[in-house]
Image (cartoon, coloured by chain):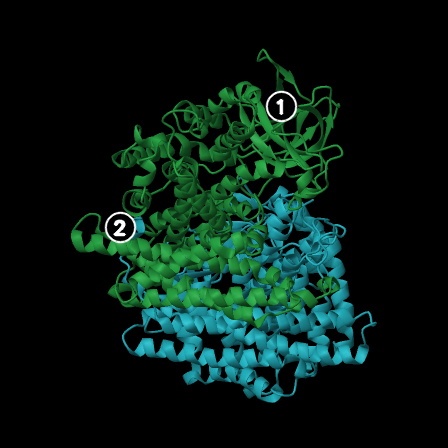
Chain colours: A green, B cyan
Amino acid sequence: MSYIYSYNTRDIKFILNEWLPVEEILGFDKFKDYYSKEDFNTIIDQVRKIAAEVIAPTAEDGETIGARYVDGRAVIPPSFHEVYRYMQDNGWGTSNVDHEAEGILPTVLNGLLIEIESAANPAFMPYVGSGSGAAAVIQKYGSAAQKERYLPKLFDGTWSGTMAITEPSAGSDVGDLLSKAYPTDDPEIFNIKGNKIFITAGDRDDVGNVVHLYLARVEGAASGTKGLSLFITPKYWVNEDGSLTPNDLECSGIEHKLGLKGSATCALAAGDNNNCRGWILGDLPDENGRGQGMAQMFNMMNEARLDTGRLSTAVTANAYWNAVAYGRERVQGRLLTNPKGDRVTIDKHEDVKRMYLQNKATTEACRALLSKGYYYEDIREWAPDQERREWAQRKIDMITPLCKAYPSDEAWILTAESLQSYGGYGYCEDYPAANATRDVKIWSIWEGTNFIQSMDLLGRKWRQNKGQDFAALLKEVQDFIAENKGQLEAFEKEIGFLEKALAAYYEIQGAIFQYATSGKPQLMTIYARRILTATAQLYCGYLLLDQAKIALKRMAELGEDHYDYNFYLGKVMSARWYLNNAVPNVWHVADLVKIGDTSVIEAPEAIFDY
Amino acid sequence: MSYIYSYNTRDIKFILNEWLPVEEILGFDKFKDYYSKEDFNTIIDQVRKIAAEVIAPTAEDGETIGARYVDGRAVIPPSFHEVYRYMQDNGWGTSNVDHEAEGILPTVLNGLLIEIESAANPAFMPYVGSGSGAAAVIQKYGSAAQKERYLPKLFDGTWSGTMAITEPSAGSDVGDLLSKAYPTDDPEIFNIKGNKIFITAGDRDDVGNVVHLYLARVEGAASGTKGLSLFITPKYWVNEDGSLTPNDLECSGIEHKLGLKGSATCALAAGDNNNCRGWILGDLPDENGRGQGMAQMFNMMNEARLDTGRLSTAVTANAYWNAVAYGRERVQGRLLTNPKGDRVTIDKHEDVKRMYLQNKATTEACRALLSKGYYYEDIREWAPDQERREWAQRKIDMITPLCKAYPSDEAWILTAESLQSYGGYGYCEDYPAANATRDVKIWSIWEGTNFIQSMDLLGRKWRQNKGQDFAALLKEVQDFIAENKGQLEAFEKEIGFLEKALAAYYEIQGAIFQYATSGKPQLMTIYARRILTATAQLYCGYLLLDQAKIALKRMAELGEDHYDYNFYLGKVMSARWYLNNAVPNVWHVADLVKIGDTSVIEAPEAIFDY
């Protein structure tokens, strides 16, 4: 058994009960009759139990059985069928995205519940999530007829869905996709022709239908992303009476991947027999050939980006707790401070503790960042005040690239540190560390590579609304500094680092703007990924200090002997480690950016022969 | 076919022909009648051809067939048998470590040849290397009888060997191993009892015997590493007449690993039937119970550490060239500077070029560092002058931890960047990138974890010979700066960075010494790994600039139209990228060290529940 579920939910409870001002959300009409803060811990404990007892036992099947391609279809492990039904039938699945239903979970809670679930079997989760994404888009953009035809069976999980975007020759380059939609007699129905790849949960043997939201270009529509439309293009066409007819959309293979082997990553062939129907979502392309597909898809995509950060955080954190559990049993070496003493468990060695604290602090940073995202989503959806909703949307816009890229970049470093802490056993698949490193690697790539995220941040988000939205994000950090400087004795040094990092960040922005206006726009590209990391570190440094401030207070109230004291002490240590070790990277990146090295730009491609 | 061999040897030729002063080595008695500089390129081309045509085609078998455990023994892919024999029979194998033979290859050349070979099938290489290591130790420390009995068949590859060190409860903690050696009637022969794990090539079905150099403690000898002795403990005991008798040393299993699946990582059980004989190497433990085992083993270990850096560099560089080959074919997106233009191959995108140049510069840095090591090894072995030999040994001592840890740490980052450059295909095992990431991970762990390397550097090498040996290493950097400052217009900025980094490095040392003497010795431990990286970056920054200086000159001589111009331009770009992007990390680490964060030290283990 290489998969071990070791998730601890204490930080999640802290976020919901003590850190985020969730009262506002619970006061919204959507939730006020259904949930109160007192319910949170109970629900979290219940989901933790489901994750451990229902979901986690299936993880091993993902590795040993895996998703397979058999007789023209994707076949997934039988235990995945069961857990999928369990989740859908017990209120933990797609029904939560039904915005017209009563009693759905607030995202600020459900976002964290899905983290708990994801850690239990990351290869399984997309089988639920992909249907939820498709259902949400249909509910938002679909006609009454489309909703009636598709939503009930998507919401109850009888069918699932996908977003079918990527093509063999159009990955990052979505605007160049080749899938075409040809008009038919029915103005809403098109004949779809094309090939898609990398469609997560794009085919499966546990549901009656897979409803693809298929991105294609209506014949004659504009080139590039602006000409794209989204089509409901199911595996089985749903007739008016509810009966199903094969829709000439076949799974042509699945990928043999580094990790997440239980997750079927499918290639799809649409219209090989010129008989694949797609039902256009929203309006036909306008007189300029502009479709609504990209905008509709981004609605799904932004949540998928948060989901990617969440998967990264969940697997990384579980790998860390696995490593800690191992380190508490494994005896090796003696203390540096007592070299003649008894041998000790490795969790007492400084460098091992360093690996643990780096993991702990960074996953808590990622979780704090993502939780902000979930929190804003509820406000964006349900706040009665339009202005407040728009405010939340702007916040989401600013942090989405950070939420996607930072946890997925860190996951590669952090899971490797967890693996390293086992010594040679870390390299053996009988222990859980290796599996985690294999699983996490895709997340820096899918849903827009981390480079695309960084260009979204620098090229779009920095400038959105004339730069005011991003300035508002930085102002959160600035206000925190102003409010706490000289007020928090235990963190004087750390607040100083945050201040130094903020100043350095302004220098980064200044340098990039100067390069852009002085004929060196490519320098933005060269430094983009490093700047994204620095942005996340700056913002997360503030978030962790904000949390630690609460923890300090609680420590003083509870005293050292209280059972919860070590949790709060841990929050303080996380903030200290992060501010002293991660946040200084912001001024390091500023140093690099100011150097403005042009070697990459000047290098002709031919030098890479060598 | 996921494995593709794309090795380019131009940098290796540059190192041997233009950079390192190999004339001294070729003038040694050992080599002067056999090799001249003119032979190098021919030999390199020949080995490149063997690597591509003989070794590389077996790599896939390592993944698909793998090493298996069948009926109590390790079974390796049949194609590995053939290539092993080919290497041994054609002068590319163990015979090169026979110091008494004529015409062996100088290490400065062979070290680089093995890099070329390693990239072709990293899982295969230890099947040759492990026998070479054992043979070298027996030749150095064995009695005449031992040499006569074992060396001929080790040198010609009829038998292979291992170093059997690690045990289930003694990994990093060698001094606590449990294997025991009990005296017999013959004072040189002991009864060995114990278990070993993680023995690379510890069992195999392609050779007649496996000669383990088995680390164990003579009953009653001192505790800790000082009481250990090394025993020739073969799988089959070799009788005086050359006949073989089973030696009660069994392979009890092999590991199921993340990568290097063709390499059999064996568990060994010695003396389960109390009938395992070991022939002690060198002297019996002295009157204080001190054995010679550790010192003997370190002779093997230091070379194994260079070998680890070499494997890391080889696999990383091959993954980089694989990525470049892919990037030259893969069309995606448009140029930032020409967004309305045609789609381009991805090797033209800035961030992709950044990933390539980071890979190119860093692998060249690692190769330069390792080459210094090979060069010193020849001087240490063969220089007529004792003082010169000792000088070379001191140099080897200083750089060995860098050679082991820096390339293996970077390999994880760099192979991931190569993988990232493919987009989603990088995550698919049909492409070669994923395999490379799986292979490299062990190298930060085996032969002494990279933390052990960093403590070796800080705790031992910084202080060796009252600090003079390490000071001499830093003086190389200082002298380079003094000699070139104001003299190299093209690199003024870069030499400035090197100077700034050297100053920062002195601050790192100062801070660590101050912590050590002011009751905070653990801070050395906390920062050790980061300091090792900074040390390598400082030293490699100097090496790459030293190479680029030659390249600049050659560019001026050859002119832009010369076919070799781009190689030299590439050397200049590597140095520029490295000095502008990697070397600044030295002052970043100095910043961190000076902060002196004690959070890891203060953190009680209990906080890692959360």
**Disc 1 element:** loop
Q: Which mark is residue A235?
A: 1
Question: Whole-percent x and y of residue B19?
Answer: 68, 78
Crowding at dot 2, Cα within 10 Å, few <14 / some 14-19 / many 20+, comes out as many
Can residue A504 be seen in the rendering of this structure? yes
Q: Which quadrant of the figure contains the C terminus of chain A?
A: bottom right
Can residue B401 be seen in the rendering of this structure? no
Snapshot quadrant of residue B540: bottom right
The chain containing the residue under callout 1 comes to A
Q: Which quadrant of the figure contains the N terminus of chain A?
A: top left
Q: What residue is rendered at 59% in x and 87% in y?
A: B385
On screen, residue B366 above or below A343 = below
Query: In the figure, is residue B161 to the left or right of A34?
Result: right
Question: Whole-percent x and y of residue B321?
Answer: 69, 58
Q: Which mark is residue A567?
A: 2
On screen, residue B463 above or below A437 = below
Q: What residue is rendered at 69% in x and 38% in y?
A: A227
Q: Which mark is residue A259?
A: none
**Type of amino acid at the residue the image marks with label 2:** Phe
